[in-house]
Image: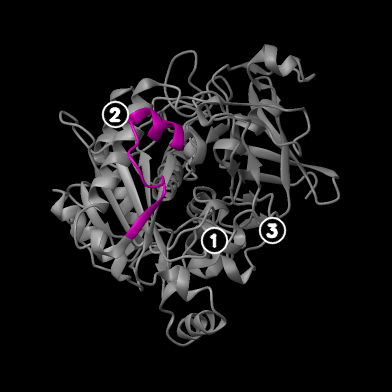
Amino acid sequence: MDGAEFDYVIVGAGSAGCVLANRLSENPKDRVLLLEAGGPDNNPWIHIPVGYFKTMHNPAVDWCYRTEPDPGLNGRALDWPRGKVLGGSSSLNGLLYVRGQPQDYDRWAQMGNTGWGWSDVLPLFKRSEDQERGADDLHGTGGPLSVSNMRVSREICEAWIEAAKAEGIAYNPDINGPEQEGMTNAQLTMKNGKRCSTAVAFLRPAMKRENLTVITRAQTSRIEVTEGRVTGLRYLDPEGKEHIVKVRGEVILSAGAIGSPQILMLSGIGDAEALAAHGIESQLHLPGVGANLQDHLQARLVFKCNEPTLNDEVRSLFGKARIGLRYALFRRGPMTMAASLVIGFTRTREGLETPDIQYHIQPWSADSPGEGVHPFSAFTASVCQLRPESRGSLTLRSADVRDHPVIRANYLSTETDCRTIVAGVRQAQAIAARNPLAAKISAPHSPGPGDHDDAAILDWVRNTSTTIYHPSGTCRMGEGPTAVVDARLRVHGIRGLRVADCSIMPEIVSGNTNAPAIMIGEKASDMIRADRGAP
């Protein structure tokens, strides 16, 4: 590809990048190049919904990032899985389809980001969606992304819903409907029992077009900037050889909240003093690159049960065979399971406009996906704070793109964050004490039995909590000295360069981030075509 010229070069074939590749290649006059550092999505576990047990922490498809030791977690470092494969993290994630709260997007607009209010983005969510339940004012059908009901249920999860009702938390049939608050049976990005990643939904159909070129195992190393305008891009092949392509239109970074700021900094766009320390010549002093890092932290409560759970089903060879056979014959059962069977949104205190806590309820328990289930009957109730105040940062480790950047998550660094997560744990314990769930619980496992004051609960959170895989905010959209992109996702001060992924979020959304990332891809494609005068 050396010397080839394109109208659009998209970096990263993830949740937003695959959408952009599809939408921008709809015009046959435009030559579009999509570069992906990972390989094709041909690992069969990618397409089996429960396959995230096998793909997370697998360096063949996962970047395997790791944070720095975090004071807020009592000095622990966390693994941060991110997809390194066609489909990006949509090929590794827990499949949950959650848009967030309308108020999230209205806040973005109120911060000066015109065109990002709820009324602006709702049509984009609907355009992407092929909703199994049918179309209505808030949902669409006929879009590329299949959104399906769960194909498995477990009594322990239904008991959680009933216990939550007893605690005053109502059942909500659609947390992407008029109101987010309540408990619900999760919906998934799944079609006919198989994962519907953005590679499946958006990229694969578009790859039939002659004007779209997709190169895998191509790691972008630098963007070429001449007199304030992007003119080209360099990438490394698997042997480490550098190649260059020319750009007559735009480069769109969709490499995620870690990859996009790293590429900007390696290209001389970031804090000039920090870049100089690595011998990188500054193209533009933009100190907000890599700042404003946000993530959802989850505290995972585990309760031992006096009746079998999925832990018991998968510990025997016969149980595994039965599960596998049911999936092979009917595309049903535990192999179609998302990261959670039940999710819910609640408030921890009076006076809040919207929920500030999200629950993920799983009929199994483990120390982490990929390590195997616990050797006893149990279920997990994960609690995460939706709108953390804590902010972290991402900086370069070296001037070599192959070196992972330095990730400082800075969890639980504010009083509000600490107070909210403790209140969420307390609420989960209160739900677990309600029947019919309480009758199924033999003992709490983590945190263990006994009376724990708030300080002890917070210390347990610091010692055991982990990411729920939602890094965002590192190329903040907005105005002012710490903003990176404007409301049309154009990098401030550089022509022909945009960012379109979760890094542009000024504030993290109140929920899972895959559906919002897809929406960002849709929004970016509309703005790019409009700015070029295309239909």
| Between 37 and 142, the one nearer to me in the picture | 37
Upstream in the sequence, badge 3 or badge 2?
Answer: 3
Q: CA distance from mark 1 to mark 2?
A: 33 Å
- Residues at circles 3 and 1 in contact by the CB criterion of under 8 Å: no
Amino acid type, label 3: Gly
User: Which badge, 1 or 2, comes first in the chain's sequence?
Assistant: 1
The magenta span reads: 442-460
In the rendered image, residue 446 lying in the magenta stretch gets the answer yes
Where residue 259 sits: x, y (%)? 62, 38
- Give the residue pinned by disc 3: 39
Earlier in the chain: of badge 3 and badge 1, it is 3
Which of the 4 quarters of the picture holds residue 435? bottom left
Residue 47's spot in the image, x, y percent? Answer: 54, 69
Query: Disc number at residue 335?
Result: none
Say which quarter of the image contains residue 333.
Answer: bottom left
User: Tag 1: Cα neighbours inside 10 Å, few (<14), some, or many (≥20)?
Assistant: many
Q: Which residue is mark 2?
A: 107
Q: Residues within 10 Å of mark 2 (few under 14, many from 20)?
A: some
Measured Cα–Cα span from mark 3 to mark 2? 37 Å
The foreground one among 24 and 379 is 379
Helix, strand or loop at disc 2? helix
- Element at badge 1? helix
- Residue assigned mark 1: 52
What distance separates the C-alpha of mark 3 from that of mark 1? 17 Å
Q: Residue 170: tell me if it is visible.
A: no
